[in-house]
Amino acid sequence: MITELGAENKDVPKWLVEGDFRCLKHSPFLTQALSAHMAILRQKGDFARMLAALEGVYFDGFCIHTFGDVFPVLLGAVGYWETGKTKAARELISCALDFLLPDEIFNQLVVYDSILKGFVRECIAWHAPESLCNFDREKNRMAVVFAAVYPDCAEGEAMEQLTEREYDIAMLAARGMSNEQIAVQLFLTVNTVHAHLRAVFKKIKIERRSQLFTIMQQRDSDIGSQ
């Protein structure tokens, strides 16, 4: 919540910003405070301190005993992933999977899969492939709900999922070029262009080229205003 609200440091208790958890050493709220502290550091891009805080609390190894432990562990995975320590990130995600998957609790996994650009799904495919179908089903369900509440954000996130080739084709199609013209310009077959456009339409959940034009125009406007 602190991260989403963009709270300034002056609005957050000093001990929480600085990660001084001595007063919570034996408190059941320690993991919640750690999660909030790590979220603040992630917002600042201070992944070194973020991981130091995690490792300081879980000095004897990472183990999830309660649902509250899931949050700092997944945030730790983000920290390791952002610093290029993929193996360590995978180990933390596997720890979360061992706790969450038996009860098919997917919501936090879906959220962090978005943050980690599909890395959580990759870990599920490797760690528990039998859960992949249910994970994808929940991810799609949450995407529909999110799109209904935050249509502009959902649209932008969908655009980020396009491959470089799909984005190029979407740009040309939005400019009014036919599949045949796009094929000539990009040295592709018409069938390949058609297949890429179908993928684009599916990812950003549209049905007509006129919708694609509106989305691409809005995206260009947003980029130009940054």
Image (tube, rainbow, N blue to C red):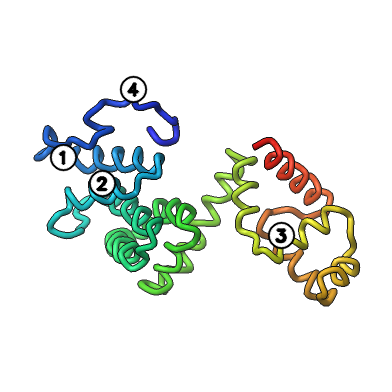
Q: Amino acid at mark 1?
A: Pro
Height in image: 184 above or below 206?
A: below
* Residue at the spot 24% in from the left edge and 34% down from the top edge: 18
Label 1: state its secondary structure: loop
Image quadrant occupied by the N terminus: top left
Label 4: state its secondary structure: helix
**Residue where numbered disc 2 is placed:** 68
Q: Are marks 1 and 4 in contact (CB under 8 Å)?
A: no
Q: Are marks 3 and 4 in contact (CB under 8 Å)?
A: no
Q: Amino acid at mark 4?
A: Lys
Work out how far the residue at label 1 is from the one at label 3, CA to CA, in angstroms: 48 Å
Image quadrant occupied by the C terminus: top right
Binning the other alpha carbons within 10 Å of mark 4 as few (below 14), some (14 to 19) or many (20 upward) gives few
**Residue where numbered disc 3 is placed:** 167
Q: Amino acid at mark 2?
A: Gly
Q: Earlier in the sequence, mark 3 or mark 4?
A: 4
* Residue at the spot 49% in from the left edge and 54% down from the top edge: 114
Q: Amino acid at mark 3?
A: Tyr
Q: Earlier in the sequence, mark 2 or mark 1?
A: 1
Q: Earlier in the sequence, mark 4 or mark 2?
A: 4
**Residue where numbered disc 4 is placed:** 10
Q: Earlier in the sequence, mark 1 or mark 4?
A: 4
**Residue where numbered disc 1 is placed:** 28
Label 2: state its secondary structure: helix
The residue mark sitting in front, 3 or 4, is 4
* Residue at the spot 75% in from the left edge and 48% down from the top edge: 216
